[in-house]
Amino acid sequence: MRNLKADVLSKGEIGLIHEGSLEVLSEVGIKIAHAGARSIMERAGCTVDESNGVVRIPRDVINGALKSAPESWTFSSRDGKHDAKMVSDGSRTNFMNLGMGTKICHYVSENKFDTRDSTIPDIRNIAKVLDACENVDLVTQPVSALDLMDKRCVRTLHEAEAMITNTSKPFLLDPDPRYVDSYFDIMKACYSGDEEEALKKPFLMVGGCSSSPLQLDTPFCELAIKAGEYNMPFMSMTMAMAGTTSPVTLAGTMVIHNSEALAGITLAQLVKPGLPVIYGSCTTGFDFMTDTAPFGSPENALISSASSQMSQFYGVPCITSGAISDSKCPDFQSAQEATLNALLPALNGTSNVFGVGLIELGMTFSLEQAVMVNDMIPLIRHALEGFEVSSETLSIDAIKEVGIGGEFISRPETMAGMFGHTHPELFDRNMYEGWKNTGGKHTLELAHEKVQSILSEHVATPIEPGNLKEIQNIIREADKKVL
Amino acid sequence: MTQKDLNERAKKAVMAYDQKTSAEVAKEAIAAKVDLVNLIQEGYTAGIQEVGDLYQAKKLFLPHIMSAANAMNAGVNLLTPELEKSGKSAGEGLGKFVICTIEGDIHSIGKDIVAIMLKVAGFNVVNMGRDIPVKDIVAAVKSEKPKAVGTSALMTSTMVNQKTFEELLKEEGVRDKVITNIGGAPCTQQWCDEIGADVYSENATDCVNKMVARVKM
């Protein structure tokens, strides 16, 4: 078989979650904090209760939104060399990091780490490493710049600048709805002032996260509306936690998540029909032994997988959490969790695995974890591709020729086909003496060396000096206006 | 029904997560004109504290605490107006703790869990709700005169208001009158130190442990 697939949900189960969500949205409704957003929904045929902000959404409004949402679209890159294809048919899985944490785990030496608050220099370094990671297809802001929290500046623009000057990959922002016009101006600047190009090929995406259960806050709505105005792709993300802000069952949690994601997509489509949108899930379970919401858990993998299937059912590309670990440093736990939680959603055809590099339940970034997961991605891709069984690949003729007790090493097919097998960079496959003779370094040490070499040598596609000056101008002017 | 019987039934109702019985006991107690403060302390609070002890021992968990708290509130919420009428109070316990989700942020479940756990631990908790303007929190510090005030922020965009809150408390001359406590997923000990807050709580248990230690200092 080629292109291995799994189905966490059967067709019937997809239908049940879908119908359950429609029932919730039409009977319970969703609380929408933004008056303008409520008007948009009302004009489209929803029932709005202005006394409590609850909007009840009938199925035909949702169906209309899903019809207008593009089934696939290209998320452009700043330099045109890293465009990411967003699909909803399960044919392509991208990998990206997660955001936003507030800490970074620095590797000091083997088994010694220093975790501290993340800063602007950290964001620059992370962007550089993600840019160099050939298997990371797009990026999001990984951590917040806590060193700018109390500075009189527009933190979000400085964070965005730190990212785009160190990576040219498509970028999902940590957006502040007050500055969507600035984000657009920055894109325009990268296109040397060409507004049409910025509208046609946006390399910045904005997104909002619903508040479970069943609430869209003001920033979410403002972002959905502004995204439409500037033709920027919009992600409708959820972050429910089973047993706390959604039912304890994963099926019930899927209903809450799905209802919220659909409501967000509906709003975005009503503002601008045809706007590229993303069906997003960072919804997960809850561990009552630690009272935390783990992301390295099978529950998270199952919810992300189910979400992938729902998004394919709706024909909307998705971003689903995966490859995240709950460990406090890169280690066995972080390796196991990242693997399971990348693999399962990928098997279920997710458009984007959202989590490279994040540990500590998504709150800490590790550069070493990022490069290790980067090394793992082609292994996963290779495994999911399966292998071809055909009259040619059965190699019967070759077997007959080589015969009993012969060798296949010197065969021309071996010479031609050897590079079709995997060879990871950081996961050592030498025998013991060979490994010892080539340095005897463990994975984490090799990962750290890779990080160091990226940081000292890698250069992202530079922004033209004139355009960069304009970007810095935009930020400076915005900073001046901060009271 | 004697005081002792009512106390016992209240305690059992809390431990059985039985809101109906909890409310019934409260109504009977009001009708029977028993000592309502004693009923709260030896009945409802005794029940929730026992559930709290079992939670600390990891024999019971959050769902049990929340359910027990709901059962307790079903009764105590009926008693509170009666106490106010007669000018009595159930006591401050370990002290008053004002808690809220900070301005701009509507996430509340973590904060509500902390509120319940502080109540179980013996604090008199004033839960202001969510998306509370910084100036209103300062006003509450002035009017409620709590021992501590806790703000929760779930987004880095709202976290900055925790610093604004510290500054406004100083400006209003009440910073030294209250212990400030911060929490929420993006918050860190480093952030707490940087903004000058007194306590950083990683979760509800952390908050309770630190606050109990603090007030007993």
Image (cartoon, rainbow, N blue to C red):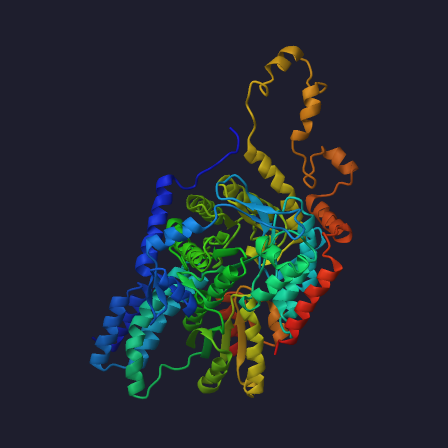
Front residue of A465 and B80: A465
Q: Is residue A476 visible?
A: yes
Give the number of callouts: 0
What residue sits 58% from the left and 67% below the top? A179
When the figure is inspected, residue A267 is found, relative to residue A12, above or below; the finding is below
Q: Is residue A47 left or right of residue B103?
A: left
Image quarter (top left, top right, bottom left or bottom right) of the C terminus of chain A: bottom right
Q: Position of residue A476 (x, y in %)?
A: 68, 71
Front residue of A207 and B187: A207
Q: Is residue B28 left or right of residue A1?
A: left
What residue sits 51% from the left and 45% below the top? A72
Q: Is residue A34 visible?
A: no
What residue sits 47% from the left and 81% below the top? B136
Q: Position of residue A205 (x, y in %)?
A: 56, 56
Image quarter for residue A360?
bottom right
Q: Is residue B123 left or right of residue A78?
A: left
